[in-house]
């Protein structure tokens, strides 16, 4: 199963107005996805406006604890849902892929 998220204007809008910096969750997620050493588990999409979690079990077990206080993929998705606005099933991806617009 793959998990895909689009990054776009909403991430910019998630900046803390008092501090002028992105929410810590977004910063950590960006760092996690942007690491080329983990591209076999999670990587940016072809258009560089999305990211795909290619291996959710490894993502949860091996990567999440390095950035968050848990290794629960569902918790990561729930938190991500606070920054995204729905899903789109019209993408040319495997049926088991999750796609979220940010």
Image (tube, rainbow, N blue to C red):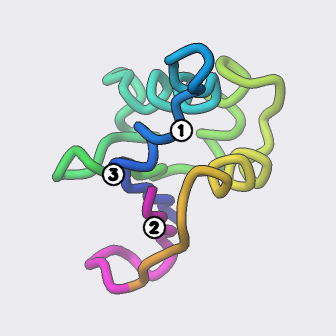
Residue 13: x, y in percent?
A: 46, 41
Seen at 35% across and 34% down, the residue is 39
Circle 3: element type: strand
Residue 45: x, y in percent?
A: 27, 50
In the picture provided, is 33 more to the left or to the right than 50? right
Q: 10 Å neighbourhood of mark 1: few (<14), some, or many (≥20)?
A: some
Residue 14 badge: 1
Report the magenta residues as a range. Answer: 90-102
Residue 29: x, y in percent?
A: 53, 31
Seen at 53% across and 38% down, the residue is 14
Circle nearer the N terminus (1, 3)? 1
Reading the image, the residue beneath label 3 is: 50
In three-dimensional space, the C-alpha distance between marks 2 and 1, rounded to whole angstroms, equals 19 Å
Seen at 67% across and 53% down, the residue is 82
Seen at 44% across and 49% down, the residue is 10
Reading the image, the residue beneath label 2 is: 99
Q: Is residue 30 above or below residue 10?
A: above
Q: Is residue 52 above or below residue 1?
A: above
Is 89 contained in the magenta span? no
Please tell me whether the stretch drawn in magenta is mainly helix, strand or loop: loop
In three-dimensional space, the C-alpha distance between marks 1 and 3, rounded to whole angstroms, equals 17 Å
Name the outermost residue toward the top: 19
In the picture provided, is 8 more to the left or to the right than 72? left
Whether the residues at callouts 3 and 2 have beta carbons within 8 Å, the answer is yes
Circle nearer the N terminus (3, 2)? 3
Q: Observer-nearest residue: 69 or 88?
A: 88
Q: Is residue 32 above or below residue 90?
A: above
Q: Observer-nearest residue: 3 or 100?
A: 100
Whether the residues at callouts 2 and 1 have beta carbons within 8 Å, the answer is no
Residue 11: x, y in percent?
A: 45, 41
């Amino acid at each position: 199963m793959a998990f895909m998220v689009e990054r776009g204007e909403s991430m910019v809008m998630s900046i803390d107005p008092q501090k002028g910096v992105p929410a810590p969750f977004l910063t950590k997620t960006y760092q996690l996805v942007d690491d080329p050493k983990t591209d076999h588990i999670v990587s940016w999409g072809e258009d560089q406006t999305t990211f795909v979690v290619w291996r959710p079990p490894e993502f949860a077990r091996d990567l999440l604890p390095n950035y968050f206080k848990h290794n629960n993929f569902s918790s990561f998705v729930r938190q991500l849902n606070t920054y995204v606005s729905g899903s789109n099933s019209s993408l040319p991806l495997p049926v088991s892929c999750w796609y979220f617009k940010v």
